[in-house]
Image: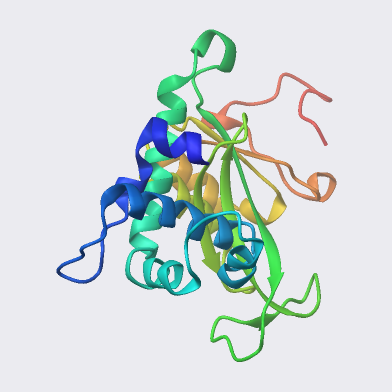
Amino acid sequence: MKNAGFLTGFTEEFSSVVAYERIERDVLQRRLLLALFALGTNMGIHALVATGEHPETEAALRHVRRHFITVDNLRAAVTNLVNATFAARDTAWWGRGTAFASDSKKFGSWSSNFMTEYHARHGGNGVMTYWHVERMNVCISSQLKSCSSSEVAAMIEGLLRHCTDAEIESDDVDTHGASVVAFAFTELLSFRLLPRLKNIGSIRLYCPNGARPAGPGSVPR
């Protein structure tokens, strides 16, 4: 992460929420990297300070966490990193980065969280995080959603508002991310929806553009 910070300058995206700060930029960069490491690894600032492998105090890191690390700043930093990754890639080896997959994962959370719901399929209270990931493991979008909200809506939202330089041509989803409405909107928006249909044996399939099958067995059942 330190090397990425030096190469891309993503720490420049973290501006203070207050009007004036007197922290020198090199000191602020070190504190930002430490605070982001503590948050990203779920170690926490207190445990990071207890390791004693840096000169920063817990109060200094908590000040940076409180005044510099916001949702908007984090999104801007992630966009910076993603765009730098795509720019550094050799397309002959890595491809153009136009094929993506999206899916959600449940995380347990306390019932006092306003977004917490009981998940009928996975069981237990929690929230969902919906990701869009490029086939070479670059995540361009993440969304926090409730357990009962539409995955189709989250899929389309991520395709349209990922805020990176990625040029999406196709998106793989599971059964919960596909519907007739999803096919209609992705077609209008010029995306190819490529679902993995769990119930393909019990659904009705349609030929595109009104084409008719050549004969029995030409359409998968």
Q: Name which residue lies at 64% across and 64% down.
A: 42
Q: Name which residue lies at 80% across and 48% down.
A: 198
Q: Say which of 205 and 16 sits in front.
A: 16
Q: Residue furthest bottom?
A: 112
Q: Residue 28 vs residue 86: left or right?
A: left
- Residue 193 location, quadrant: top right
Q: Name which residue lies at 70% across and 24% down.
A: 213
In percent of width and height, residue 149 lies at 57, 71
Q: Residue 142 vs residue 122: left or right?
A: left
- Residue 123 location, quadrant: bottom right
Q: Residue furthest top?
A: 92
In percent of width and height, residue 32 lies at 42, 55
Q: Say which of 185 and 79 sits in front.
A: 79
The figure's colour scheme reads: rainbow
Q: Quadrant of the C terminus?
A: top right
Q: Is residue 100 visible?
A: yes
Q: Is residue 191 visible?
A: no
Seen in the picture, residue 70 relative to 120 is either above or below; the reply is: above
In percent of width and height, residue 40 lies at 58, 57
The image shows a total of numbered marks equal to: 0
Q: Say which of 108 and 4 sits in front.
A: 4
Q: Say which of 133 and 50 sits in front.
A: 50
